[in-house]
Image: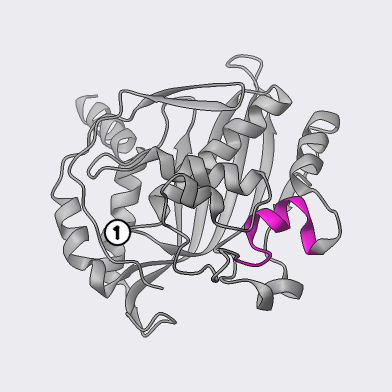
Amino acid sequence: KFLNYINFIMTNITEKYEAQYRKILKECMQEGTWRNDRTKVGCYSVFNKSIKVDLSEAFPLITGRRMYPKIFKTEFEWFINGETNIKRFKDNKVTIWNEWADSNGDLGPVYGHQLRNFNDQSIDQLEDVIDSLKLNPDSRRHVVSLWNPAQLNEMALPPCYLYFQFFVNWDPVNGDSLNMFALQRSGDVFLGIPYDVALFSQILLYISEKVNIKPGKMEMQIIDAHVYENQIEAVDEYLKQPILPQPSYSYSNGQLTIKDYMYGPVITAPVAV
């Protein structure tokens, strides 16, 4: 019985968000395939990795190094408002898209455009998926697709996250919940993935409030998960830090409030453009 208890505890520890994240980082470093990638920096890649978080427990932020909620909150607003210029980022002193924007700050028909006006055809996928969840919650078609081959050549950077889908889980005992799956073709595990997980978690919270179903689980699948050569020192430093408790949060009227976020040092690494 004691061994069963220990196995139970260890299983639950390994399933926690930051432990999953660190496992992928280590797999990139130890088992990754070396690639002379598009950026010419070079990276170590692993195939088809998954991260699962439960929004009923906490908000998923890594704690071994400091994250800045302003970054993913700004990207969330930019995304759901269908914006394709970096003005909102500049106004909030967020620089994550600076390297790809043109002289006017434009990125072409990227994420938000495909979400709110797919292929310039007035297809509002955000409103459509909200309506479908309200009107037909058991449908298997609660899908948003951001990969549009017809407009890839007009984009400053093709979408890294391609697709997300919702699933209503009926549970008379614990209460109904809204789950979400997101697919990424490519993920910079050290710099990008923590913010992508937070972004999609906020999207799930937003949709959940709109359809009046409590948020449940979010799973992200990353087809090409990689660590760049010039990030190795930073990754090593991060992996030496302890994992701290996940922050709690509240969400009301479209506003995310993160509470009791404890974090380690600021650890930076170059962006591969």
Name which residue lies at 43% across and 23% down: 249
Give the residues drawn in magenta, as a range. Answer: 107-119
Q: Could you tell me the amino acid type at mark 1?
A: Leu
Q: Is residue 246 left or right of residue 198?
A: left
Expressed as whole percent of the image width and height from the top left, the position of residue 35 reads 37, 82
Depth check, front residue: 47 or 145: 145
Q: Is 253 above or below relative to 22? A: above
Name which residue lies at 24% across and 72% down: 230
Expressed as whole percent of the image width and height from the top left, the position of residue 172 reads 66, 15
Q: Is 8 above or below relative to 51? A: above
Name which residue lies at 40% across and 38% down: 69
Residue 106 part of the magenta segment: no
Residue 85: quadrant of the picture: bottom right
| Residue 19 in sight | yes
Q: For the C terminus, which image quadrant?
A: bottom left
| Residue 145 in sight | no
Residue 111 part of the magenta segment: yes
Residue 27: quadrant of the picture: bottom left
Question: Which SS type dominates the magenta stretch?
Answer: helix
Give the crowd class for mark 1: few <14, some 14-19, many >=20 residues within 10 Å: many
Which residue is under mark 1?
25
Depth check, front residue: 47 or 117: 117
Expressed as whole percent of the image width and height from the top left, the position of residue 66 reads 26, 42
Expressed as whole percent of the image width and height from the top left, the position of residue 103 reads 54, 70
Depth check, front residue: 199 or 25: 199
